[in-house]
Image: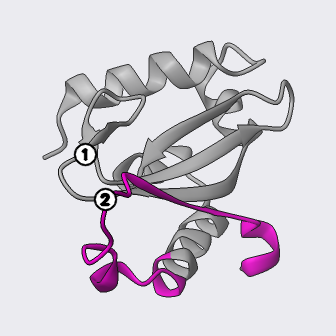
Amino acid sequence: MENQYHRKNFIKEIVELSKSKSYQCAIKEWDLVGQSISVGERKDQCICKKEIMYLFEIRNRENNNLTFIGSSCVEHLEDPSMFEKVKKLNKIMIKPHLYCLKNITRINFYGVKSAI
């Protein structure tokens, strides 16, 4: 079962970053625009406050706010097309080879719309 603490944090943060102050309307304002991977010991944090390695960058169409969310929080946006984009991005990335890289803490993937 999902931790309710993380879900409440996600809802609070996504509404604060959105133009609409209704959660059901706010989640419709966001597009997936990129993905980053924390490499090695480094962990980043989703807006829900959970430590994550794979970050998905989302942009608000209404106010251009940007934020990072984890793969489990992508589901909270309730957008089936975004789920498909995340699946395609995961296939494009070369996850097993990332741990061979030295002195790199994050790898960014942008141009998502053209890649998927």
Disc 2 to disc 1, C-alpha distance = 6 Å
- Identity of the residue drawn at 30% across and 53% down: 53
Name the residue: 79% across, 68% down. 113
Residue drawn 56% across the image and 81% down it:
88
Residue 2 in picture, x, y percent from top left: 19, 43
Q: What amino acid is at disc 2?
A: Val
Q: Residues within 10 Å of mark 1 (few under 14, many from 20)?
A: few
Q: State which quadrant residue 7 falls in.
A: top left
Q: Nearer the viewer, residue 40 or 63?
A: 40
Q: Residues within 10 Å of mark 2 (few under 14, many from 20)?
A: many
Q: Which residues are magenta?
A: 90-115
Name the disc covering residue 79, or none.
Answer: none
**Residue 115 on image: x %, y %:** 74, 79
The kind of residue on which mark 1 rests is: Arg
> Which residue is disc 1 drawn over?
42
Q: Which residue is under mark 2?
A: 39
Vertical arrangement, residue 76 with respect to residue 19, above or below: below
